[in-house]
Amino acid sequence: MMFDQDAIKFRKTGTEIKEAMRARCAALRARLDHRNRALDALMGDRKKLRSYLVLSVEHRYNMHEGSGELRGRDDISSEEIEDINQLCKRIREIEAEIYRLELTLAHLEDGKEFSLSLQELVAYGFDVKP
């Protein structure tokens, strides 16, 4: 029998939540730094960046959907376009999550006690404690 996850509540103080959020922000920043280095490398490769920008417009509007698309010798593959799209999407998601956590950190009261759902506990960065 499955239990109702929403029925379980975890009591945490603002201080405990802030501590978990700071750890979560640090982990997210490390992941963001890794992805930013990959994006910097792409931006440093002018030919690849140009190819991405030119081809991604075509890709975005599906101008050659289903046809054998002709590409130049220096053009990047559709797989590379998808990889870059995923990289940029993930950077945006991480930045948005960091901002959300920092906004909450700025306004959360230390001494107040909160009742958190399992999803909130995970989202705020709480971890299994030994």
Image: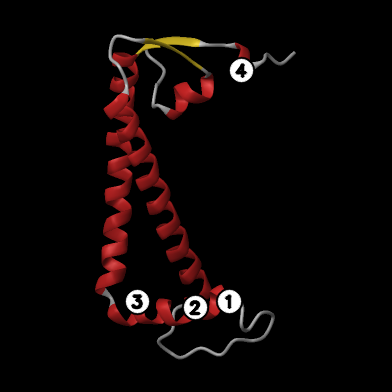
Query: In the rendered view of the protein, which quadrant contains the N terminus?
Result: top right
Which amino acid type corresponds to the residue marked 3 in the rendered image? Leu
Mark 2 or mark 3, earlier in chain: 3
Q: Which residue is at a point 44% across and 79% down the rendered structure image?
A: 76
Q: How is the image coloured?
A: secondary structure
Residue that carries the numbered disc 2 in the rendered image: 57
Q: CA distance from mark 1 to mark 3?
A: 19 Å
Kindly check if marks 2 and 1 are in contact, taking CB atoms under 8 A apart as contact. Answer: yes
Which residue is tagged 3?
49
Give coordinates of residue 96: x percent, y percent.
39, 45
Q: Is residue 71 left or right of residue 46?
A: right
Give coordinates of residue 104: x percent, y percent. Answer: 34, 29
Q: Which residue is mark 4?
A: 6
Q: CA distance from mark 2 to mark 3?
A: 13 Å
Query: Which labelled disc corresponds to residue 22?
Result: none
Query: Which of marks 3 and 1 precedes in the sequence?
Result: 3
The amino acid marked with disc number 1 is: Tyr
Tell whether label 4 touches label 1 (CB within 8 Å).
no
Report the mark closest to the observer, 2 or 3: 2
Residue 35 versus residue 62 in the image, above or below: above
Q: Earlier in the sequence, mark 3 or mark 4?
A: 4
In the rendered structure, the answer to whether residue 95 lies left or right of residue 72 reads: left
Q: Give the labeled residue for mark 1.
A: 61
Task: Tell me where residue 130 sits by quadrant.
Answer: top left
Residue for point 40% across, 52% down: 92
**Mark 4 is on which residue type?**
Asp
